[in-house]
Image (spheres, grey):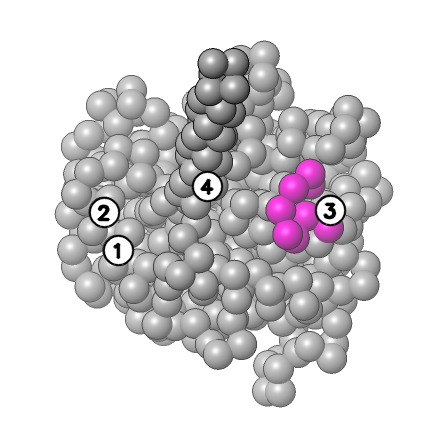
Amino acid sequence: MRSIRTCVLVTSAVAIAIGICAQSIVSAEKNSIPNDPASIAIEKGMKWLVSVQGKDGGWGQDGGETSYVRTGERLESNGNDVANTAVAAEALLHAGNTPTRGPYRQSLERAVRFILERVERSPVDGLAVTDLTGTQIQRKLGPYIDTFLTSKLLADLDGNMDDEQANARVRQSLKKCVAKVEKSQLKDGSWNIAGGWAPILGTSMASQSLYVANAKGVGVAQAAMDRIETYTATTVAPPPPERLAGAGGSARGGVGAGVGSGVGPGVGASVASGSVRTGSTAMSVDVSAASAGVSLYKRAQELEQLSRTPKDREKNEKQINGIKGQLADPKFVSGFGSIGGEEFFSYLNISDSLRRAGGPEWERWNGDMKAKILKMQNEDGTWAGHHCITGRVAVTSAAILMLVADREKTFLTTSTEKR
């Protein structure tokens, strides 16, 4: 009898172990199905990113070393920069790697070290976290896009490092970036600082970085959050014309014209900022300039800002539905007309927004975007822009972020204290 009971107990234990194992496998595969086309594309993209990472841990416009640059790709700056490194690190992080786990955790660690060293060396005053200027991504998204992308990355990393000391280092640099972003906010609430082709995307990233940092327990001035909400609510008007003369033409008021005032012009600035006049022609011209005259960029910023919480979605339902209605227009979704990095970042804003509420609109958008992006991947695993932001690092990273937009986060998204 004892032998039978022992056999039964062992058999039961084995069955339970098998059940637990099977449940763990299902859980692990929930976010990533190995044979799923999107997962295959994501893995190819990450492998390429890691393969061209620089010896210093960073990335530049088309790779981390000059030997990785494509023939015919015109580099707008030399060396690896903070912005491209930050967006590549974001792609690795959101695709399932953290500083403590994942096949590419070492590459992520090296990238984070590259960024932290530069933030720590940067002066307390001023918005810059790097002394490298004139990069392609700066010329398109604004001269301080490095700071905005870094602030968002560090906010995501906060509380997710491998030890207490590393977390403290990230938190210190995050607080430094948050202070820079707050102090540089323009009077109208945006960060549409002159010197870029479409600085509205920089405004979006600056705002997102403050929102995530606040969720992690970093002190963010409520006034700064209120101002960007007011700016967005004020400018969420009928979309501007899709074309206001040629790319960067004078009908847009100059390349990268900002709205408001308070921060001096950046690299290549040609237009002084003006004051906001609600509902005025001046406002629509300025906003159009901030989004390079491409309504997709501005509407994507608005949708992300207006839909962050259930309360936001209820309050801004009319405006949100108006923007959603435009997503059915292929001309609107095409943005500038060809797909550059700006389109990828705008699509990412839309995906993040629609996923919050879920439903048929999100499912349709996500399916369509995945199909579109998968068709655009190159044989080597990269994606490249066809205008403005053409560099493979930023565009490949943005494409990966798009493809993982429907996955659950594998890192802490709020502070442990708040949770």
Q: Is residue 319 visible?
A: yes
Which amino acid type is shown beneath numbered disc 3? Answer: Glu
Which amino acid type is shown beneath numbered disc 4? Answer: Ile
Whole-angstrom CA distance, mark 1 to mark 2, is 6 Å
Residue located 45% across and 64% down the image: 41
**Cβ atoms under marks 2 and 3 closer than 8 Å:** no
**Residue bearing the label numbered 2:** 363
* N-term-proximal mark, 4 vs 1: 4
Please tell me whether residue 104 belongs to the stretch shown in magenta: yes
Viewer-nearest of discs 3 and 4 = 4
* N-term-proximal mark, 4 vs 2: 4
Residue located 33% across and 59% down the image: 370
Residue located 65% across and 27% down the image: 159
Secondary element at image label 1: helix
Residue stretch in magenta? 99-106
**Residue bearing the label numbered 3:** 109
Which amino acid type is shown beneath numbered disc 2? Answer: Glu
* N-term-proximal mark, 2 vs 3: 3
Across and down, in percent, residue 414 comes to: 53, 23
Secondary element at image label 3: helix
Whole-angstrom CA distance, mark 1 to mark 3, is 32 Å
Across and down, in percent, residue 305 comes to: 37, 35
**Residue bearing the label numbered 1:** 367
> Where residue 25 is drawn, which disc sits there?
4
